Structures are given as structure tokens and as C-alpha cells.
């Protein structure tokens, strides 16, 4: 009976901490959550020790000295349980899934190489997350897996996360815009982007580019340079009953940026983009994209960013190839 308090404390610690990691998301968003749990664990250990000493009539300094071995075991167990939970159990739990055994999850957690296999059509993102301890791994993995298009997430000790995803359904920017990364900063350390294979039956066709002297001037939409400022201006082009929308804006360095008012991910919503300072914001998912990156970073298709639209500067005008507009009628609903 003398150790009932100690045993009860250990059971409470294990069940309480495990339940907290699985259920209390809002608490895990607190950077000091596990530190608080450790403090609470020591409080319970102290209460258990006081009850035991008082019950045996030795609640005194001589009694504490006499039961030094018991107290060291009690507090040592407290530290051990928390270390096992935070440094081993929780991290392994982050990698356990319906098709992943405990042994496989253990191997993935402590391996040095990428933890996910990238198949054809999949993209990869490796991130380093500023989590206070490995015990936060299940939170990060859980939040990433909520995103449609994320195929798999594998945690690697101490703070690395390997993500495989379908770039036509989600993007790096969308994943990094998660609320959890406002608290625990994520840094991209590796990235592999799947190349798109364009089939003849696909509605998305590669734009066929021509030299300026090969096409009559009527094959271009002209935008006066005087209209293009650091405030985005939207334009429409009607083709075969569809209205194709695009915009033009000057970046902070004065360079001209043109892009479709739709991305490869959210185009179906028909909501387009709006401007917030130096960013274009998707009106459907809220993803922000820097204006400075238009025309360079958005050349890769599949992400949630304004669709790439080539322009040519000619005299006092910016020319948009009608061929490019025609090849993107799929963006217009």
C-alpha cells in the first residue's frame, strides 16, 4: 500500500499526457505546454511523497532522510516517464498510421534519410520546424495531414518533417501558411517539384510562343504602360463565350508583372485575386503570393499562385499574346 500513490501518479501521468497530445490541440499550440506538464508531474509527485510520509508518521527531515531511496525513485520515475513520453513515445506516435507498424514508425523516426518515397506525379517538401521538443511532432503531422493533397508526412528526430503531396491539389505556400507555423516557424530545407506531363487530351496545353515579327499586331492585347502602377489593374478578354481575366501591376522595383486572375488550384471558385500591399491574395483560400515573384517563381504550374502569363514590352505598351490567353480558357468558368 505504501506505493499506491506513486503508482497512481505514474498511471495518471501516462494517461494524462497521452490524452493531451491526442486531444488538446489548443494546448499543444502553447510552446510551454510540456514544461507545464512536467511541473504538474512534480507537484503530483510531491503530493504523493507527502501523503506517504505522513501516513507512515515520518513527515520530518529525519523521515525524509530515512526514505531517501523511495523519494529518489519517485522523482527519478517522474523524470524518466516524461522523457520517455516526450522524446520517444510521442515522436513514434506521430509516424504510426493505419498501414505503419510500430517497428516501421520507430525506424522512420530515427533515420537520417528521407522518410517518404516519392512516386511519379508527387512532389516533396522537407521542412525543419522550431518545435520546443519532439513531443510536438504529432501536432505538426496532424495539421499537415488535414490539407487535401498531402499524401504522407513522416517525422524525423529531432525536428524534421518529410512531406509528399500532389501539387495540383495543394502547394508549398498553402502548407506553410498553416496556423501552427505562425507559432512554430518552419524552414524549407529540401524540395522536389514533380514535372507536369501534358497529354494531348489534357485541357491544359503548353503555350506556343512566337517571335514578335511572326505574328500580326492584332494577335496581341495591348496595355498602355501608363496604366500599370503599383496598384494592380484587372483586364478581361472574351473568347468563344468565355471571359479570361488577368491583371498587370508594377513590383516594388518597378518591373512589370502580368498574371492570370486564377491559379491551378482554386480557379474553380472563380473568385480570383485581390491585392494587399506587395502581395496578391487568393480570394478563395487566402494564400498570399509576393508580387515580386510573379513571372519567375510562378512559372511552375500546379501551385496556388496567380497563373503565369508572359508579356512583351513594346514601346509604350505591354503586349499579351492572344495565343497564351486562348490556351488558358480552362481558367475561365
Image (cartoon, helix red, strand yellow):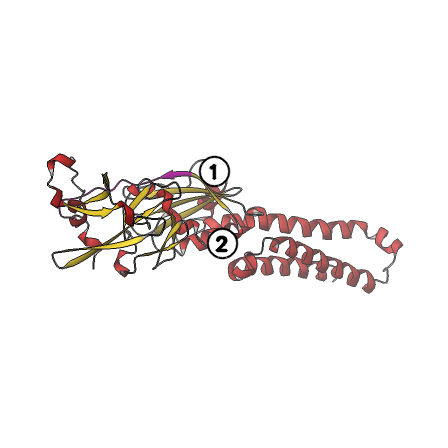
Q: Quadrant of the C terminus?
A: bottom left
Residue 309, picture quadrant = top left
Q: Is residue 22 above or below residue 137?
A: below
Badge 2: residue crowd in 10 Å (few <14, some 14–19, many ≥20): some
Residue 23, percent from left and from top: 52, 62
Q: Where is residue 104? Give x, y as percent.
A: 44, 44
Give the residue displayed 66% in from the left and 54% down from the top: 38
As measured in the structure, the alpha-carbon distance from the residue carrying label 1 to the one carrying label 2 is: 25 Å
Which one is in front in this view, the residue at disc 1 or the one at disc 2? 2
Under tag 2, what secondary structure?
helix
Please, what is the dominant secondary structure of the magenta stretch?
Answer: loop
At mark 1, the secondary structure is loop
- Could you say where residue 43 lies in the image, as x and y percent from the top left? 72, 59
Q: Is residue 168 above or below residue 284?
A: above
Q: Position of residue 188 (x, y in %)?
A: 44, 41
Is 261 or 79 nearer to us in this picture? 261
Image quadrant in which the N terminus is located:
bottom right
Q: Which residue is mark 2?
A: 180
Disc number placed over residue 111 in the picture, else none = 1
Name the disc covering residue 192, or none.
none
Q: Which residues are magenta?
A: 190-204
86 horizontally vs 298: left or right? right
The answer to which of 131 and 151 lies nearer the viewer is 131
Q: Tell me if residue 2 can be seen.
A: no
Amino acid at each position: 500500500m505504501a506505493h499506491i500513490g506513486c503508482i497512481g501518479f505514474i498511471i495518471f501521468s501516462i494517461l494524462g499526457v497521452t490524452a493531451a497530445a491526442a486531444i488538446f490541440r489548443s494546448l499543444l499550440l502553447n510552446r510551454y505546454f510540456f514544461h507545464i506538464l512536467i511541473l504538474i508531474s512534480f507537484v503530483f509527485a510531491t503530493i504523493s511523497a507527502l501523503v506517504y510520509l505522513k501516513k507512515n508518521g515520518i513527515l520530518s527531515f529525519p523521515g525524509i532522510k530515512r526514505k531517501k531511496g523511495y523519494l529518489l525513485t519517485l522523482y527519478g520515475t517522474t523524470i524518466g516517464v516524461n522523457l520517455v513520453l516526450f522524446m520517444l513515445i510521442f515522436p513514434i506516435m506521430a509516424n504510426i498510421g493505419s498501414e505503419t507498424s510500430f517497428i516501421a514508425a520507430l525506424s522512420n523516426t530515427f533515420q537520417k534519410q528521407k522518410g517518404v518515397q516519392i512516386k511519379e506525379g508527387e512532389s516533396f517538401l522537407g521542412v525543419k520546424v522550431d518545435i520546443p521538443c519532439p513531443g510536438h511532432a504529432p501536432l505538426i503531422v496532424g495539421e499537415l495531414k488535414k490539407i487535401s493533397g498531402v499524401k504522407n508526412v513522416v517525422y524525423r528526430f529531432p525536428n524534421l518533417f518529410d512531406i509528399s503531396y500532389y501539387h495540383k491539389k495543394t502547394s508549398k505556400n498553402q502548407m506553410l501558411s498553416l496556423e501552427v507555423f505562425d507559432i512554430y516557424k518552419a524552414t524549407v530545407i529540401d524540395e522536389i517539384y514533380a514535372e507536369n506531363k501534358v497529354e494531348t487530351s489534357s485541357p491544359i496545353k503548353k503555350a506556343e510562343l512566337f517571335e514578335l515579327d511572326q505574328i500580326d499586331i492584332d494577335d496581341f492585347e495591348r496595355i498602355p504602360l501608363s496604366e500599370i502602377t503599383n496598384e494592380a489593374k484587372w483586364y478581361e478578354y472574351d473568347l468563344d463565350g468565355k471571359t479570361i481575366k488577368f491583371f498587370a501591376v508594377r513590383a516594388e522595383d518597378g518591373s512589370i508583372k502580368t498574371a492570370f486572375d486564377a491559379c491551378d488550384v482554386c480557379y474553380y471558385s472563380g473568385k480570383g485575386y485581390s491585392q494587399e500591399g506587395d502581395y496578391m491574395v487568393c480570394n478563395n483560400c487566402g494564400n498570399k503570393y509576393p508580387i515580386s515573384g510573379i513571372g519567375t517563381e510562378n512559372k511552375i504550374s500546379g501551385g496556388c499562385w496567380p497563373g503565369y502569363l508572359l508579356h512583351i514590352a513594346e514601346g509604350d505598351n505591354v503586349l499579351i499574346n492572344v495565343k497564351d490567353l486562348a490556351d488558358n480558357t480552362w481558367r475561365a468558368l
